[in-house]
């Protein structure tokens, strides 16, 4: 994959990650605003607990997606982005366009889904 295409995907991934993080932050602010009286008095302790809560409260789907984005960015650094993890062939460009976090090419993905259906 050429550097220009790679840079394009990197931007898409970073933008999407930022969007997810903002979403979660906004959702949290909203929740906190609803119940300020529930916050503990010890502000230092509270701050660290809120931080922990923030991590836990990221909605599951978003958290998973962020992890996938981080993983894709890591693969970019390693030079493996766009390469199927299973057969090590390049992933179809159209598939990457639709879903930049893809780690499997279409046929490997279909095989995996087929397996999951059998063993689910
Ligand atoms: Zn494959």
Image: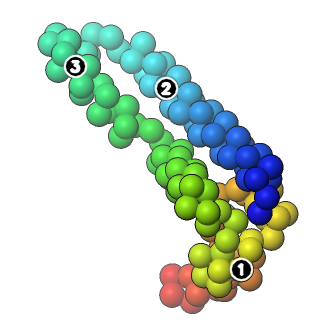
Q: Is mark 1 within 8 Å of ligand 1?
A: yes
Q: Are marks 1 and 2 in contact (CB under 8 Å)?
A: no
**In screen coordinates, is 68 left or right of 105?**
left
**In screen coordinates, is 24 left or right of 1?**
left
Looking at the picture, does residue 32 appear above or below residue 100? Answer: above
**In screen coordinates, is 96 left or right of 120?**
right
- Label of residue 25 in the image: 2
**In screen coordinates, is 57 left or right of 77?**
left
Q: Residue 66 at x, y = what percent? A: 53, 47
Judging from the image, what secondary structure is the residue with disc 3 in?
A: helix
Q: Judge the density around disc 2: few (<14), some (14-19), many (≥20) Cα neighbours within 10 Å.
A: some
The Cα atoms of the two marked residues, 3 and 1, are separated by 49 Å
Q: Nearer the viewer, mark 3 or mark 1?
A: 1
The Cα atoms of the two marked residues, 3 and 2, are separated by 17 Å
Q: Nearer the viewer, mark 1 or mark 2?
A: 1
Residue at 70% across, 56% down: 100
Name which of mark 3 and mark 1 comes first in the sequence. Answer: 3
- Label of residue 89 in the image: 1
Q: Residue 83 at x, y = what percent? A: 67, 71
Can you tell which quarter of the image residue 118 is in?
Answer: bottom right
Name which of mark 3 and mark 2 comes first in the sequence. Answer: 2
Colour scheme of the picture: rainbow
Judging from the image, what secondary structure is the residue with disc 2 in?
A: helix
Looking at the picture, does residue 72 appear above or below residue 117? Answer: above
Q: Which residue is mark 3?
A: 46
Name which of mark 1 and mark 2 comes first in the sequence. Answer: 2
Q: Residue furthest right?
A: 94
The Cα atoms of the two marked residues, 1 and 2, are separated by 38 Å
Residue at 80% across, 70% down: 92
Depth check, front residue: 90 or 53? 90
Q: Judge the density around disc 1: few (<14), some (14-19), many (≥20) Cα neighbours within 10 Å.
A: few
């Amino acid at each position: 994959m050429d550097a220009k295409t790679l840079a394009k995907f990197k931007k898409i991934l970073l933008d999407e990650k930022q969007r997810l993080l903002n979403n979660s932050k906004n959702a949290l602010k909203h929740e906190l605003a609803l119940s300020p009286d529930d916050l503990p008095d010890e502000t230092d302790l509270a701050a660290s607990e809120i931080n922990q809560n923030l991590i836990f409260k990221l909605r599951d789907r978003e958290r998973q997606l962020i992890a996938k984005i981080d993983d894709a960015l890591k693969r970019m650094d390693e030079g493996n982005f766009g390469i199927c993890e299973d057969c090590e062939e390049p992933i179809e460009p159209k598939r990457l366009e639709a879903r930049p976090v893809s780690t499997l090419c279409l046929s490997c993905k279909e095989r995996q889904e087929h397996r999951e259906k059998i063993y689910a």
